[in-house]
């Protein structure tokens, strides 16, 4: 065997190549730290001359200003958006060109009966109830109810109302409201009057949303959920509260046996009952309601199984409909798998038209850049946004690329909307820095009545720091600068330690 020895001069030759190899390695790593994060002035000028008024007027003209997700007005809106996405130079990302299908089940309760250990009611004045299964008739009987207080699992708060409980085949009894918020009687009369009798703002009131409570119960295997409407907790009376639940329920169609249906994403039924019904169940189990609710506010609260029977029968009208998201992108120059998302609802009234016009203007501005951003920039016009967020939910659960690789999501709303970041101070700081260039004021924190209805929540639930912004020209300049900065940067904004979305699935930045 021949042994080859290295002479010193050959070592010297190899060492001489090290700086070159390191330099090439820097190029292969894209040198992101040296990328400009400042939007060229020519692109800003292009944004300022975007046809915002024309696009808004064109969208408002469809369906007399009310663009429904289904029917002829929906088809016309989709045709307009696809054409404008193509004109803006976006690459299609849907299963069918720019279109991403959103299949929904339409469920209407025709008649229903509920018996809670002797408390009996039919659907109507004392009971709001619907099935989350697309079945014409649902009959369920459960041997026991599980009182889970406010039904909150919040690691950042150090509480788990479901700890040690087995809800499989059982029904969760949940009080509406947030355990960290004071009851209405604890507010001063002056403060309550100023709030119009509603609860005071809560920075992270996601846990007060009924959708959260149902989803959390489903995650723990519950067969059904009984939501207790207590005016002292939610600040509105029963009549006002029950009217907020529409007669027609729309929900994403989830085929049995698919990844979306496991773990459980829905329960068999959801019932909204007045406080008297919930208190009746507690008394039947020899529990004083006032003490039970006081204990439920404690982070150390542990739920309890109530050996009380429950029976429910629901007759429904069931149908299925399909709408579409419109999705396009500017592929990233260096890392196309990472992204920044800019989204807007396309159905609805004037606010939706303004938001979509702003989305198109931003798409054209990003496309006019001399070079593509380092990361991809995705533009999404989502359907079924008004009070449902179903288009955004579908996009977030079936994204063209993993949500774990998304740095942030900017969700455009009407021109008068105030900026609202969902629990990410770093994202808000990025926006503020972008706004200071034009001396534009941004909001600070989160407005209770803005984000629960916004598509931003769908992205936040997938672990993506999100923000709701307006669609005025100053807002669009702010999003352009902030979005470009993130698209030219590594990593991304992080959640605050007390964020309810901090433990959502996401890669470590």
Image (cartoon, rainbow, N blue to C red):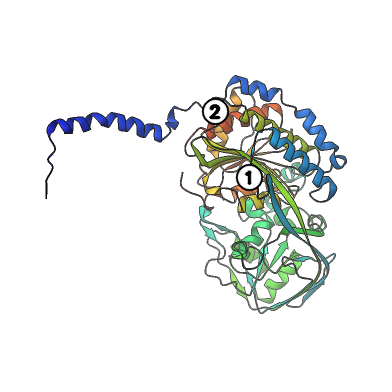
Q: Position of residue 484 (x, y in %)?
A: 56, 31
Looking at the image, can residue 20 be seen?
yes
Image point (55%, 66%), residue name: 302
Disc 2: CA contacts within 10 A as few (<14), some (14-19) or many (>=20): few
Q: Which mark is residue 220?
A: none
Dot 1 falls on a residue whose secondary structure is: loop
Dot 2 falls on a residue whose secondary structure is: loop
Image point (56%, 28%), residue name: 433
Q: Which residue is mark 1?
A: 93
N-terminal of the pair, mark 2 or mark 1, is 1
Which of these two is toward me, 208 or 415? 415
Q: Which residue is mark 2?
A: 371
- The reply to whether discs 2 and 1 touch (Cβ–Cβ < 8 Å) is no
- Asked where in the image residue 478 lies, by quadrant, the reply is top right
Q: CA distance from mark 2 to mark 1?
A: 20 Å
- Asked where in the image residue 125 lies, by quadrant, the reply is bottom right
Q: Position of residue 103 (x, y in %)?
A: 72, 57
Left or right for 478, reference 25: right
């Amino acid at each position: 065997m021949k042994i080859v020895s290295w002479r010193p001069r050959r070592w010297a030759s190899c060492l001489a190549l090290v700086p070159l190899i390191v330099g090439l390695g820097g190029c292969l790593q894209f040198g992101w730290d040296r990328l400009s994060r400042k939007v060229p002035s020519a692109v800003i000028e292009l944004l300022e001359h975007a046809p915002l008024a024309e696009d808004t007027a064109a969208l408002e003209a469809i369906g007399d200003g009310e663009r429904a997700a289904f029917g002829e007005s929906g088809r016309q809106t989709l045709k307009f958006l696809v054409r404008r996405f193509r004109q803006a130079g976006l690459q299609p990302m849907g299963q069918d060109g720019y279109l991403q299908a959103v299949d929904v089940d339409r469920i209407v309760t025709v008649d229903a009966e509920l018996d809670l250990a002797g408390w009996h009611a039919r659907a109507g004045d004392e009971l709001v109830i619907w099935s989350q299964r697309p079945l014409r008739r649902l009959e369920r009987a459960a041997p026991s109810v599980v009182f889970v207080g406010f039904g909150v699992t919040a690691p950042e708060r150090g509480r788990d109302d479901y700890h040690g409980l087995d809800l499989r085949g059982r029904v969760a009894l949940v009080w509406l409201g947030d355990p960290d918020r004071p009851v209405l009687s604890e507010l001063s009369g002056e403060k309550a009057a100023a709030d119009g009798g509603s609860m005071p703002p809560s920075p992270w009131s996601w846990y007060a949303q009924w959708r959260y409570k149902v989803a959390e119960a489903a995650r723990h295997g519950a067969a059904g959920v009984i939501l207790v409407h207590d005016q002292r907790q939610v600040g509105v009376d029963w009549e006002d509260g029950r009217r907020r639940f529409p007669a027609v329920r729309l929900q994403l169609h989830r085929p049995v046996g698919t990844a979306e249906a496991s773990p459980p994403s829905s329960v068999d039924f959801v019932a909204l009952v007045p406080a008297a019904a919930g208190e009746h169940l507690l008394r039947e189990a020899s529990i004083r309601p006032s003490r039970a609710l006081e204990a439920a506010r404690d982070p150390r609260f542990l739920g309890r199984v109530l050996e009380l029977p429950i029976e429910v029968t629901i007759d429904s009208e069931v149908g299925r409909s399909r709408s579409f998201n419109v999705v396009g992108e500017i592929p990233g120059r260096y890392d196309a798998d990472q992204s920044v998302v800019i989204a807007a609802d396309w159905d609805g009234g004037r606010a939706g038209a303004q938001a979509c016009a702003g989305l198109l203007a931003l798409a054209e501005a990003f496309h006019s850049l001399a070079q593509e951003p380092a990361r991809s920039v995705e533009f999404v016009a989502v359907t079924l946004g008004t009070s449902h967020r179903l288009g955004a939910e579908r996009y977030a659960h079936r994204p063209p690329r993993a949500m774990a690789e998304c740095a942030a999501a900017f969700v455009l709303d009407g021109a008068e909307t105030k900026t609202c970041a969902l629990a990410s101070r770093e994202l808000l700081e990025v926006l503020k820095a972008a706004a200071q260039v034009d001396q534009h004021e941004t909001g600070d924190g989160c407005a209770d009545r803005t984000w629960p209805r916004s598509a931003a929540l769908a992205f936040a639930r997938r672990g993506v720091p999100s923000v709701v912004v307006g669609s005025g020209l100053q807002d669009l300049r702010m999003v352009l600068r902030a979005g470009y900065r993130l698209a030219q940067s590594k990593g991304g904004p992080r959640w605050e330690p007390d964020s309810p979305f901090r433990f959502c699935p996401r890669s470590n930045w």
